[in-house]
Amino acid sequence: MRTILVDDMELDMRLLELKCAGMPDFEIVGKFTDPAEALAFAGANEVDFAMLDIDMPGMNGIDLAMRLREIRGDIIIVFVTAHPRFAVEAFRMKADYMVFKPFDRDDIRDVLERAKLLQSRQKKRVRFHTFGSFEMLVGEKPVRFHSAKAKELMALCVYNEGRPVSIYAIIEALCEGSEDKNAANTGYRRTIKELLDTLRECGEEEIFVRERGSCRIRRELVSCDYYDFWSGAADAVSRFDGRFMSDYAWAEPAIYRMFEKKGHAALIDLEK
């Protein structure tokens, strides 16, 4: 697990690092006394686990944790603090665990074991590839859709990042050029059924939500290179080479935005 430590007290952070030393499956990829630097690092690098002090000047640990969750919704947050009064606020923002100072190696070992358990529970079986041709994988196995239109509808929902996609937007994208509105409506209903049947067969119906007049994907239940790109994950930004959902013309506008972001990220790297 790629781990960051954040504590404005250098001595406390060194002690935490010492207690974590030698623990299996954990890699400390960043140590920060400035919460803003920790946030910037998490925005540009993959981070699975954060151990945060709470009582820090400027941005406190609670605020930092909430902003980390905005960047990476599945990050595991553990607070390390000397102040029990923060407990209610910490758990209100859905922290995963809390350790009180002074702590010993057994306390840290317990935290790390809990973090590993949480990570194993959070692992997402469904993954989407969008760089190049669109692909859905469940447990690393490609999914065979009942029809090309069902696959395109899934791609459209992924493209909209969890926001509702209206019936009209679906018909416009999937039935482009159709003059027969009745046929388009019938085709839409058939496509929805084919997608639901596909998801049911691979046991992943819960990632798709059909609502009155729209449908959407539950973004929090899936992983996707497109989502990683926009979160600033360095590996996803570097892997984007201009190919994106290449089978679908409606996805082309995103390519220009992604090139703009990649160029901006490269410029920042040059300035560092």
Image (tube, rainbow, N blue to C red):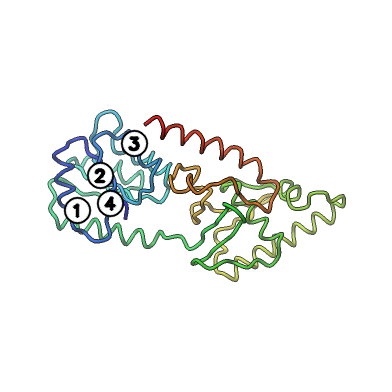
Q: Which residue is mark 1?
A: 20
Residue 211 picture location, percent across and down: 64, 52
Residue 176 picture location, percent across and down: 79, 49
* SS at badge 3: helix
Q: Residue at x 42, y 46 (%)?
A: 72
Q: Which residue is mark 3?
A: 63
Q: Residues within 10 Å of mark 1 (few under 14, many from 20)?
A: some
The residue sitting at the front extreme is 270
Residue type pointed to by label 4: Tyr
Residue 163 picture location, percent across and down: 59, 45
Q: CA distance from mark 4 to mark 3?
A: 16 Å
Q: Residues within 10 Å of mark 4 (few under 14, many from 20)?
A: some
Q: CA distance from mark 1 to mark 3?
A: 24 Å
Indicate which disc residue 165 carries.
none
Residue 268 picture location, percent across and down: 43, 32
The reply to whether the C-beta atoms of the residues labelled 4 and 1 are less than 8 Å apart is no
Residue type pointed to by label 3: Asp
The reply to whether the C-beta atoms of the residues labelled 3 and 2 are less than 8 Å apart is no
Q: Earlier in the sequence, mark 4 or mark 3?
A: 3
The reply to whether the C-beta atoms of the residues labelled 2 and 1 are less than 8 Å apart is yes
Residue type pointed to by label 2: Leu
Q: Earlier in the sequence, mark 4 or mark 1?
A: 1
Q: Earlier in the sequence, mark 1 or mark 3?
A: 1
Indicate which disc residue 5 carries.
2
Q: Earlier in the sequence, mark 3 or mark 2?
A: 2
**Nearer the viewer's eye, disc 2 or disc 4?**
2
The residue sitting at the right extreme is 179
Q: Is residue 76 left or right of residue 243?
A: left
Q: Which residue is mark 4?
A: 97
**Nearer the viewer's eye, disc 3 or disc 2?**
2
Q: CA distance from mark 2 to mark 1?
A: 10 Å
